[in-house]
Image (cartoon, grey):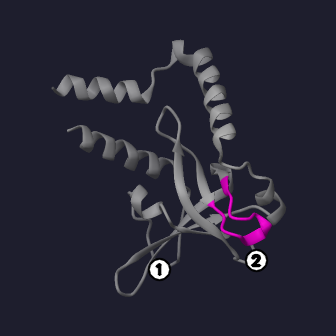
Amino acid sequence: MRKTILTTVIGTALMGSFAMSAHAQNEPQGMYSADDILDAEVYFAGGSGEEIGDVDDILFDEEMKITALVIESGSVLGLGGREIVVGTDYFTLETSTENDGDTEHRIMVDASQEEVEAFPAYDNDWWEQTKANTRDAWETTRDGAQSAWQSTRDAVNADE
């Protein structure tokens, strides 16, 4: 039961957070698997279409909304293979279905090379600072809101 609820929550978060775009002959598929998005190739959305790297991780907030992707940049753009954090304002998901029925997902980043180079590195310092900022924001708003995690836990416990 817990796995089913978690899968539903992740699927809902993916559906609600990605901006969908598809090739003209394809319809959005409606639900996306994090497993399919992980390792998806990432490209510049504008003119060059140059590859940036691959999706290494998907970051969620307390409400299970995707807030960013972690992109392993490889050695392109002079980034030296670092992991970068790309916020949801900068990417879209393209989904296409090949003639053999396989579905391919690509992440398109709408940013210049300079902007991508300035994206924060995904490292322990970034993680700890982001957790602290999020915790502070939660403390100031939690009286009027309830955590999605707590709601899910309460739903699971009610079923037992």
| 16 w.r.t. 94: above or below | above
* Outermost residue to the top: 143
Nearest the eye: 85 or 20: 85
Q: In this view of the protein, can residue 32 be seen by the observer? A: no
Residue segment shown in magenta: 72-84
- Residue at image position (28%, 40%) is 5
Q: Is residue 133 left or right of residue 14?
A: right
Label 1 SS: loop
| 13 w.r.t. 44: above or below | above
Circle on res. 25: 1
Q: In this view of the protein, can residue 103 be seen by the observer? A: yes
Q: Amino acid at mark 2?
A: Gly
Q: Is residue 81 one of those drawn in magenta?
A: yes
Location of mark 2 (residue): 47
- Residue at image position (53%, 36%) is 61
| 126 w.r.t. 106: above or below | above
* Outermost residue to the bottom: 99
